[in-house]
Image: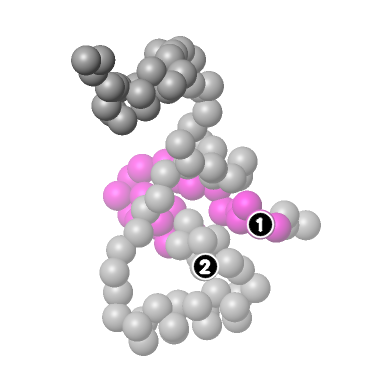
Amino acid sequence: MTKTASLKSLAAARRPAVEAPVATPAPEVPAYRTATTRAATRQLSGHFPADAVQAFRVLAAEQDMDVQELLAEGINMVFQRFGRPERIEITSGRRKRI
């Protein structure tokens, strides 16, 4: 009496051989995108009451400045108060001053 093959063994015989995946080196691309204007910078931030933030934005608009420019001016005033040289250039990455 001949033994019949099981469905499992027939299916295994019909499957193509699986090749081991070849490891390819990943390209050296940063995991995140950075704007060119922020390439050599770091963020400095804090949490303040909403009404103070709104008043600061209004002040920046009245002075025709970005919030970042007004913050830089304030930080430079703190440096000056403590006898440190000004370290932050007062410009914005979005627009150039004439």
Q: Which residue is located at x 35 percent, y 83 percent?
A: 50
Sequence-first disc among 1 and 2? 2
Q: Which mark is residue 67?
A: 2
Residue 90 horizontal/vertical position (percent): 57, 53
Q: Is residue 1 magenta?
A: no
Instruction: Work out whether 59 lies above or below 42.
Output: below
Image quadrant containing the C terminus: bottom right
**Helix, strand or loop: magenta stretch:** loop
Q: Which residue is located at x 38 percent, y 18 percent?
A: 13
Residue 63 lies left or right of residue 43; in this view the side is: right
Kind of element beneath mark 2 = helix
Please, what is the three-letter code of the amino acid marked with disc 2?
A: Val
Q: Which residue is located at x 43 percent, y 15 percent?
A: 17
Q: Which residues are magenta?
A: 73-95
Residue 18 horizontal/vertical position (percent): 42, 17
Residue 3 horizontal/vertical position (percent): 23, 18
Kind of element beneath mark 1 = loop
Give the CA distance from mark 1 to mark 2: 12 Å
Q: Is residue 94 magenta?
A: yes
- Would you identify the image quadrant in which residue 48 lies? bottom left
Image quadrant containing the N terminus: top left
Instruction: Work out whether 75 lies above or below 61.
Output: above
Instruction: Work out whether 65 lies above or below 40.
Output: below
Residue 86 lies left or right of residue 83; in this view the side is: right
Q: Which mark is residue 94?
A: 1
Q: Which residue is located at x 42 percent, y 44 percent?
A: 42
